[in-house]
Amino acid sequence: MNTQTIDQTKLDTFINRAFGDLSAGYGGVMVSLGARLGLYKAMAGAGPISAKELAARSGCAERYVSEWLNAQVAGGYVDYHAVSETYELSPEQAMVLADEESPVYIPHAWNVPASMWFDEEKAVEAFRTGKGVAWGDHADRLYCGVAAFFRNAYRGSLLSAWLPALDGVVAQLEAGIAAADIGCGHGHSTVLMAEAFPKSRFYGFDTHRASIDAARRIAADAGLDGRVHFDVAGAMNYPDKQYGLICFFDCLHDMGDPVAAVRHAAEVLAPGGTVLLIEPFANDRVEENISPVARLYYAASTTLCCAHAVSEGGRLVLGAQAGEARLAEVFRKAGFTHFRRAAETPFNLILEVRR
Ligand SMILES: C[S@@+](CC[C@H](N)C(=O)[O-])C[C@H]1O[C@@H](n2cnc3c(N)ncnc32)[C@H](O)[C@@H]1O
């Protein structure tokens, strides 16, 4: 017999919470449609417009646009003027939903949960067997989604705040050094640095061939052919160029043997060189990581980061919420002696490491 009593207030609060999350999941599909169909862009700066006008501007069918607009209003993503029956995207909403160059642009990031849903059977199998799922074995939407999600932070902070927070690194990059971007993915971080420091040489490495191909295209589009090199290579076997800077952008925790990865970094780091470790923001203890940001990272970590680390042998599966203390221990085991939190944002820890 169930002797537990139900606290109706707590139940109502939690139902509201869970239903809000369910509603947000439906809303994410609408955000993706709005971005893909150019609906937000057509609204940005347009002032109040009717569904008919938006349909004409975007080349979409009015009946669908009208229903989509009402879903946006219900979620607080678009403002509604009842008297004129018009809809308006505020400048703040436009920054998040319409301006792809904005550091707070969100829509592409919805590709990540889309891929996680698509690959749910792989996750079920991984939970049951304990086997891994390699980064390259996911649905294609994952890669552009992750690259877009992290690119916001890199564009917003890498050149203006994170590199300047490192002791002497900007001066070295300005003078000209070799710099490596390990686990570079689509290489947005590499390209940003290469654009800013023309005297330095940049090398991006990743084990995922399709990401390296994408990085090469992005570098070519940026006119950086020849100044930045992308190659398929793992964190333990990329070539030694005595790098003055070695970066790990949101990837060390994905690796199956992070200690071996940073041990290799120690071997190929020039004297006086710096390792820049960017990791998802996390505190050291689970009870300190109760927030929407931590929830997102723990979830991605479950089916993506941990699954990949296991697929690489899983000697140490850090997960995306490792926290500074566990990250510092990885570097200590690999022989590094200097480890400092140089900066932080709500989304990232920025750590400076030296031998
Ligand atoms: C979460 S993504 C981050 C990509 C990129 N640094 C960014 O910030 O957008 C992790 C990347 O690490 C790469 N990776 C995982 N294990 C690796 C390894 N052992 N050596 C090199 N790259 C690896 C994956 O292929 C993937 O591109």
Image (spheres, helix red, strand yellow):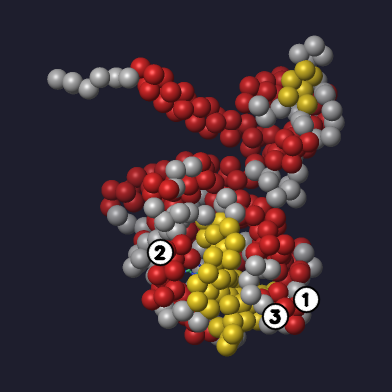
Q: Position of residue 160 (x, y in %)?
A: 72, 62
Of circles 2 and 1, the one toward us is: 2
- Measure the alpha-carbon separation of dots 2 and 1: 35 Å
Q: Which residue is mark 3?
A: 172
CB contact under 8 Å: marks 3 and 1: no
Q: Residue at x 22, y 22 (%)?
A: 4
- Is 254 on the left or on the right of 106, as rendered? left
Q: Three-letter amino acid code at disc 1?
A: Pro
Q: Three-letter amino acid code at disc 3?
A: Gln
Precedes in sequence: disc 2 or disc 1 = 1
Q: Which mark is residue 198?
A: 1
Q: Which residue is mark 2?
A: 326
Residue 202, compared with residue 158, is above or below; it is: below
- Is 135 on the left or on the right of 179, as rendered? left
Question: Seen from this angle, which residue lies furthest right?
Answer: 46
Q: Position of residue 84 (x, y in %)?
A: 82, 14
Label 3 sits on a secondary structure element that is helix
Label 1 sits on a secondary structure element that is loop
Q: Residue at x 52, y 54 (%)?
A: 281
